[in-house]
Amino acid sequence: MAATTDSVKADASEAPLLNKVNLWAGLMLYLVFYSFIRWYEGVYGWSAGLDSFAPEFETYWMNMLYIELVLEVVIASTLWGYIWKTRDRKVMSITPREELRRHFTHWTWLVMYGWAIYWGASYFTEQDGTWHQTIVRDTDFTPSHIIEFYLSYPIYIITGVSAFLYAKTRLPAYQEGLSLMYMVSVIGPFMILPNVGLNEWGHTFWFMEELFVAPLHYGFVFFGWAALAIMGVVNIEVAALTKLLKKDLA
Amino acid sequence: MSASQSAVRSRAEAVQVSRTLDWMILFTLFTAVLGGYHIHYMLTGGDWDFWSDWKDRRLWVTVAPIVSITFPAAVQAMLWYRYRLPFGAIVCILALMLGEWINRYLNFWGWTYFPVNFCFPSNLIPGAILLDVVLMLSSSFVLTAVIGGMAWGLVFYPGNWPIIAPLHVPVEYNGMMFTLADLQGYHYVRTGTPEYIRMVEKGTLRTFGKDVAPVSAFFSAFVSIIIYFLWHYFGRWFNKTDFISGEGI
């Protein structure tokens, strides 16, 4: 490509800086998957999810719980293992263009993390409020919890840890040590999952259907604040990208 | 510097890369803030926000602004102080309200069949505009806390008044007088419906009649100022770019 032109077309042989197919496929994957889950809830929540002692509850809900837990462990270990195993051992000697390409891949992971956080912390968590204001629970593993706590939370945890591992293993900007805010933005929302232990213990100890603002839920609030640490990650990224682009944008 | 040492091939490509990254950053910030802010708000002020029979003149007016000024203060600490972008509060509120409206339609109504005019979210947009405008004009987080935080608390009830007023019309039902919102709650029974669990207009302030909402709004505005200061510093902490050693972890 002539250096004098302003064309932004990439060389035919070169991989694009941003793989848009991956980005859109990832976004659509979560959208379609969660749309299916929402349909499943709508149908089998009412027809098979009201009485945990009924045989159909075991068929439609407990089996779903078992399947999703196994799949999450398999996917997490495979994905995290792959990212770690294929790490770049000479990360400080990559070209600026390769570094920029990796930042785009990293941002694809971060977009997916934000998207997964939306579904977990916003969509399925507030949904839990209306389900438990409607149906008195007779188990910790309600249809709403099987989706919210044991599906949508693990999915954002898997996505967030993958983004962190990608940055740590492939980007020069993260080789100084461990980014404090990156860890907060991944570990904080992760801690919402163990906090489910407190939630379930409290719900079985005090009958409290379903006061959402009850102090029992404040653990979720505290760890939800950690999502703000994404601001620190953005600041690190902006500094790194500015280094790469500043002279060309001047 | 030779062309091979540059990350981009031309200025046009640099501009395109920058714009694309802007959108990816904005999307991630929007959705992450949405998730964190929504879980915070629904679990600290949620019940007042979920149901019209909780939207009273006293505790709704007091609690909702206090617990909702948090994330806007923190995000302003990033977007204004680092990037001079004057829309930190409005980004937060648009994110929160998008998440809420999707939920109220698809889940409160779509899954458990509560009518939307019973479970609509509170309107927080007027306060967010004021908070951003005060920060943009003053460039001072102290003035934003004092003037913006005060405005945030005071404008909440007027900002919701056109929506809630028709539901606060008094009605008589089986010899009892209550509001239309209470009648909605009476018909749409929830597991949290009983009066011992519903926190609505407790105390004697209600006997003062017309003064309930202004007194509550003023108190809320006072606490909102303090919370703004606190969360501004939380926001600064969350903006850190520090690295720590991996040893011992």
Image (cartoon, grey):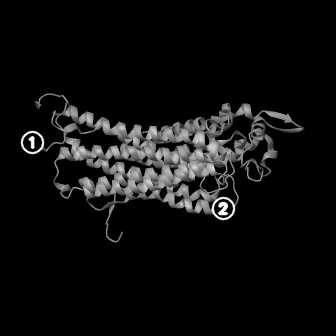
As drawn, the residue found furthest toward the right would be B175
Instruction: Judge whether residue B231 can be spotted in this image.
Output: no
Q: Residues within 10 Å of mark 2 (few under 14, many from 20)?
A: few
Residue B214, position in %: x, y?
70, 42
Query: Do the dots labelled 1 and 2 sit on one chain?
Result: no
**In the figure, is residue B176 to the left or right of A217?**
right
Between marks 1 and 2 in the image, the one whose residue lies nearer the viewer:
2
Point 81% across, 34% down: residue = B170
Q: Give the camera-side residue of A215 and B194.
A: B194
What is the crowding at mark 1: few (fewer than 14 residues within 10 Å), some, or many (at least 20)? few
- Looking at the image, which residue is at 61% across and 50% down? A57
Going by the numbered disc 2, the residue's amino acid type is Thr
> Subunit of mark 1?
B
Which sits in the foreground, A127 or B218?
Answer: A127
Residue A5 in percent (x, y) is at 14, 28
- The residue tagged 2 is A204
Horizontal side of A216 relative to B87 (left or right) equals: right
Q: Nearer the viewer, residue B218 or A134?
A: A134
Q: Secondary structure at mark 1?
A: loop
| Residue at the image position 67 percent from the left and 64 percent from the top | A205
**What is the three-letter code of the residue carrying label 1?**
Ser
Which residue in the rendered view is the most extreme toward the bottom? B248
- Identify the disc placed on residue B144: none
Question: Circle 2 marks a residue in which chain?
Answer: A
Q: Residue at x 34, y 71 (%)?
A: B248
Which mark, residue B2? 1
Q: Where does the image place residue A192, in percent across and percent down from the top left?
A: 51, 57
Comparing A149 with A232, the one in front is A149
**How many marks are shown on the rendered structure?**
2
Horizontal and vertical percent for residue B171?
Answer: 82, 33
| Separation of residues labelled 1 and 2 (CA atoms) | 68 Å
